Amino acid sequence: MQSDPLCSDAVLQTLHHLRTTSPLVHCMTNDVVQTFTANVLLALGASPAMVVDEQEAAQFSAIASALLVNVGTLTRERARAMRAAIDSAREAQRPWVLDPVAVGGLTLRSDFAREVLALQPAAIRGNGSEILALAGGQGGGRGVDSTDSARVALPAARHLARERGAVVAVTGEIDYITDGERTLEVPGGDIMLTRVVGTGCALSAVVAACCALPGERLENVAAGCRIMARAGEMAVTRSQGPGSFVPQFLDALWQLDAEALV
Amino acid sequence: MQSDPLCSDAVLQTLHHLRTTSPLVHCMTNDVVQTFTANVLLALGASPAMVVDEQEAAQFSAIASALLVNVGTLTRERARAMRAAIDSAREAQRPWVLDPVAVGGLTLRSDFAREVLALQPAAIRGNGSEILALAGGQGGGRGVDSTDSARVALPAARHLARERGAVVAVTGEIDYITDGERTLEVPGGDIMLTRVVGTGCALSAVVAACCALPGERLENVAAGCRIMARAGEMAVTRSQGPGSFVPQFLDALWQLDAEALV
Amino acid sequence: MQSDPLCSDAVLQTLHHLRTTSPLVHCMTNDVVQTFTANVLLALGASPAMVVDEQEAAQFSAIASALLVNVGTLTRERARAMRAAIDSAREAQRPWVLDPVAVGGLTLRSDFAREVLALQPAAIRGNGSEILALAGGQGGGRGVDSTDSARVALPAARHLARERGAVVAVTGEIDYITDGERTLEVPGGDIMLTRVVGTGCALSAVVAACCALPGERLENVAAGCRIMARAGEMAVTRSQGPGSFVPQFLDALWQLDAEALV
């Protein structure tokens, strides 16, 4: 299985589109990462909004540019609202993205994630364990951390992508983004990204924003992954630990330019 | 319609009262901004508390200094708890403040906000689109962002203030604070405040704290707006993007003194 | 009542164990402090996970290293999920920790905290007012702030510890950690810790992590308190207010070493 590098022109174009079109992302995400997710989108020029009531979520998904569904702190009530939002997004032809946080051993989220897989997500973003579990294999997750590398999960990711017609991003030390036929490879990131909560969840929100942009979805999603990885690299060199990493990371997203990305 | 500047003595006095009386603010606010809201109040010397169960919310509103009701992530359950808290606050003669986040197109929050308008809020804080929608006009909000300037919404704000006996703060590049008769004008703030989530919501919590202070409500609320705008100006000059803005903003609230405010 | 100092070797060993065994802490905590709690655990090398659905919470507590139950934003639905998680943790012989936020005057949380006291918590962490109220005395809390010093609550803490077989940490300017027989005293901390939301709640999560470590529970919990207090001292000297305190505090947790702790 070959994977191709992503050209930096595509990354710059995606960044430009995020800043100029400012996609409005309806984030139905978990309790822990809401603020950080919103601030990541804002730093990139996108617009976040979190709407949770079932009826309002359906109303809002029809006018948002894209919908994110993250099952990190799923409840039965939230699952109902998410289904309504997905249905509404599809009817209005808006892309929606699935983040299958810790899918595998936990019943409610695993059943829900497998169920909504049938509802044509535009993209799926998870770590190796989550993508393996979602594809029907045995994920080895421990809580929300992955014990399977992204590389190991790549065949499952390609299978999932082909079967569902979605772009699948399986992220880790190296990110692989695939539509089932073509696979792009994004280097970068840093171990520090695993010592700050919400970096993966926020990436999924960026992926949702990227699905609303003009151009090819596979390249847009891979560019979103590269933008986040590059900001992570910049922030690590400017910080003294996971605390100072967070403001530096958001500043880096805000400052990113051609020089930093090429 | 004339609007008057706010004198800096009033701002200093409000700041002094916040720090010395430390009002206890019961914040019933949205999921995304809870931490930031609490930290803004703490940095100013006030005391935040978030109590959400219907029965407990009613118990707590009777002992808190003021109540904030923010509909950003409203659910039916939360609406019930908010009604109970408002009733209890009124019975105990505590002021309550409404933040009508994204009221306009979304059904549950719009119906709820219009319903509780009858329950004598001490103050209402929103952007131009939200105040227009609440007053019965056509707001042009896109998600939580305003597409109408505060200035355009000023007649609606004055109408709302007179009709409801509330102080209405319509905020934007310039903030206008009105009781329907007199209007104060607060300059400042910065575009950066729109690239960080929760600045408007936290301002509403500060407005609630200000409603619990001695002195004239209109001036206290305007002073709260000025305190936040001035801290924003200070933070922008000390930060490199929206990430470093947040800690700088909280530090500025903590450090504010006569020199910074005059 | 005598209390002993904690030796710095015990603190270093606990820190080493946190980093090398990376306990997985199931945090059922309040809405306001989720992000900060997760980031504190990550900065110390532990792994946080927040799972909220009743069935999933029970599944997860059986595989996590420890469970934290914090009643800060309790609802009836969350109380049900917490009970299920506690039952599951006990069956799987995993320690669980109670943080009785603002127990005293508010009915739902006070009834719940007293009820689950019978379910053998490994540890309880609260401020003076909370521990007094939990032990049956009259706490003098004002919202979530304590008006009783930790010292005053020490007899109640010792009584509670003996009666329930738990380690009780009553924290304030000086922290007292007791199993009812022996009491350890931990100095440090800073007033700044009370101007940032979630420091106490995050400490309770660290206490839960410490209950999963090898060695003596009393010393492990006291060491957890000392680690947080020492990081607080370091952060205060490096920050200009409560905003810069937060990233500095997380960086300090990440950087802590023998030199800083002895």
Image (cartoon, coloured by chain):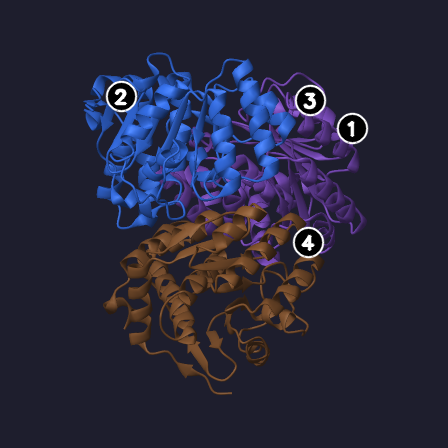
Chain colours: A purple, B brown, C blue
In the structure shown, which secondary structural element does the residue marked by tag 1 occupy? helix
Q: Amino acid at mark 4?
A: Ala
Instruction: Give the answer, above or below, for where C97 lies relative to B261.
Output: above
- Chain of the residue on which disc 3 is drawn: A
Position of residue B259 measured from the top left corner of the image (x, y, whole percent): 23, 68
Instruction: Point out the tag, 1 or 3, that comes first from the N-terminus.
Output: 3
Q: Residue furthest bottom?
A: B1
Q: What's the chain of the residue with tag 4?
A: A
Which comes sooner in the sequence, label 4 or label 3? 4
Specify whether disc 1 shares its chain with disc 3: yes
**Disc ID at residue A156:** 3
Q: Spatial distance from mark 2 to mark 1, Cα to Cα?
A: 53 Å
Find the distance from the CA under tag 4 to the CA under tag 3. Answer: 30 Å
Label 1 CA crowd tier, 10 Å (few <14, some 14–19, many 20+): some
Quarter of the rendering occupied by the C terminus of chain B: bottom left
The x and y percentages for residue A148 are: 57, 19
**Of tags 4 and 1, which is closer to the observer?**
4
Q: Residues within 10 Å of mark 4 (few under 14, many from 20)?
A: many
Horizontally, residue B158 falls left or right of residue A235, namely right
- Which residue is denoted by mark 2 in the rendering? C11
As shown in the figure, which amino acid type bears the numbered disc 2?
Val
Q: Chain of mark 2?
A: C
Amino acid type shown at disc 1: Glu
- Find numbered disc 4 in the image and state the secondary structure of the residue it sits on: loop
Q: Nearer the viewer, mark 3 or mark 2?
A: 2
Q: Kindly report the distance in space between the C-alpha atoms of the residues bearing marks 3 and 2.
A: 44 Å
Query: Callout 3: few (<14), some (14-19), or many (20+) C-alpha neighbours within 10 Å?
Result: many
What percent of the width, then of the height, locates residue A70? 63, 37
Q: Residue at x 62, y 36 (%)?
A: C77
Between C23 and A230, the one nearer to me in the picture? C23
Q: Which residue is mark 1?
A: A163
The amino acid at mark 3 is Ala
